[in-house]
Amino acid sequence: MPRECAQCPPRRKLNYNSQHAAGALRPARVNRGRSLESPAAPIQPRKIGAGGPGTIPAMLRRLARAAIPRQRVFWARRSGSLAEIPTYVVDLRSDTVTKPGPAMRRAMAEAVVGDDDYGEDPTVRDLQATAVELLGVERTLFVPTNTMANLISVMCHCRRRGSQLLLGRECHLHVYEQGGVAQIAGVHSHPLADLPHGTLDLAELERLVKRGLGSPYHPVCELICLENTHSSSGGRVLPMEYLRQVHLLARRYGVRVHLDGARLMNAAVALGVPPARIVEHCDSVSLCFSKGLGAPVGALVGGPKDFIEEAWRLRKALGGGMRQAGVLAAAALVGLADAEEMLQRDHQNAQRFARGLQELASPVCSVDPTAVETNMVMVRVDGLPPEELCRRLQAVSADEVAQTGHAVRLLLFPWTEHSVRAVWHRDVSAQDTELALGKWAFVLRTLGLG
């Protein structure tokens, strides 16, 4: 095969995302009786440096425009008409889809930074000090993700390979974190059945803790992991008395408790207590900034001084040491500043949606508003696959505009074979919530079941 000239620029290879990302933001063409957009044309490769004088400044201008936050209102043209219709996108897939607002972007741009791997970044130190007071722990450590925070915590607590970790069968750490506690930490996780509230049966928990004591056959339990709020249970909040009982049980047998607090702030707002009141029943805690708090990246692990010293070493081993991380810590500080107000609004919007969906009284979709405690709504789906319901909720047609006066793309994930999960966050307003309800009602009418 002929080799390329060493002086020639490398060819730009296109992957799936680079071909299709721009298409996701193209105007949606509404066709009468049909749905969604026509496929976008693929982006053509372009050699670096091509285009003559002025190409580089033009490229920089395009990059600057791309950095400006995009609005969530797109435009659709009705077939055969010049009338343009705004297409609203309401994204309820997760609270991880938020975009940094102007205040957060400004804080990131103006952050005072240093080398955090040397402990010299002042903004990271401010964040860690703020979190110490917020969580009521001795020390905290800023890490890239909550998955890493959980893994570090497990590794700190379970020093022996083959140690046992007890946790819920549907908890995030067990299902959605690549089995890192096994493949990296060498820890044996034993899942227990989750009760409807996201709790574990205390009698079964004690039986499993006791089983390994003095036994040459069973692994020795060293850690219990809880998740608060509990995602797979629909954002349920673990009761304070339950947390107290788990901690007393663990202390009785020399076992420690780690709290996956990815959405700890949601739990604190729902209970009306400071986060430290929840954390006092645990030996370590993680806190995520890229969910309800709206930051683009980052999490914390908190615990005693010697625990965090070991956590620092493990963060380095896992590749989580960062340099001028104050840019990220600044976003987390902004997210914490208005957390109570924003999360309370998210909870209210989720409750409003649950009540509205219940009022539709559809045999296809049902919800229990009393189970909506934070920013999540679990919708039971009968009569059609959840994937089909999600596809219809995302589709846009001229019939929808004619009947409702709006074109709404409602984005959701199927959660189980018979359920869909909707998650509220700071980028979804009360108006967006009403649009989501209207779209849901329209889809049910088209099915003849509304």
Image (cartoon, grey):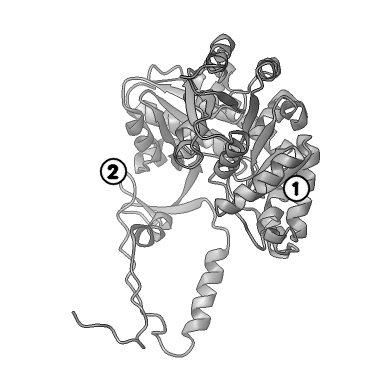
Left or right for 348, reference 363: right
User: Which disc number belongs to residue 128?
Assistant: 1
Compared with 165, 186 (above or below) is: below
How far across and down, in percent of the image, does residue 335 sit? 69, 46
Compared with 310, 56 (above or below) is: below
Quadrant assignment, res 159: top right
- Residue at the location (52% across, 71% down)? 63
Instruction: Say which element carries label 2.
Output: loop
The foreground one among 3 and 42 is: 3
Q: What residue type is labelled 2?
A: Arg
Left or right for 331, reference 423: right
Which residue bears the numbered disc 2? 34
Where does the C terminus fall, quadrant-wise?
Answer: top left
Instruction: Say which element carries label 1.
Output: helix
Q: Which residue lies furthest to the bottom in this view?
A: 53
User: Which disc number belongs to residue 155?
Assistant: none
Quadrant assignment, res 274: top right
Compared with 15, 390 (above or below) is: above
How far across and down, in percent of the image, does residue 271 sit? 71, 23
In space, the residues marked 2 and 1 are separated at their CA atoms by 52 Å
Question: Does any portion of residue 389 appear in the rendered image?
Answer: yes
Left or right for 27, reference 160: left
Q: Residues within 10 Å of mark 2 (few under 14, many from 20)?
A: few
- Residue at the location (69% across, 64% down)? 109
Q: What residue type is labelled 1?
A: Gln
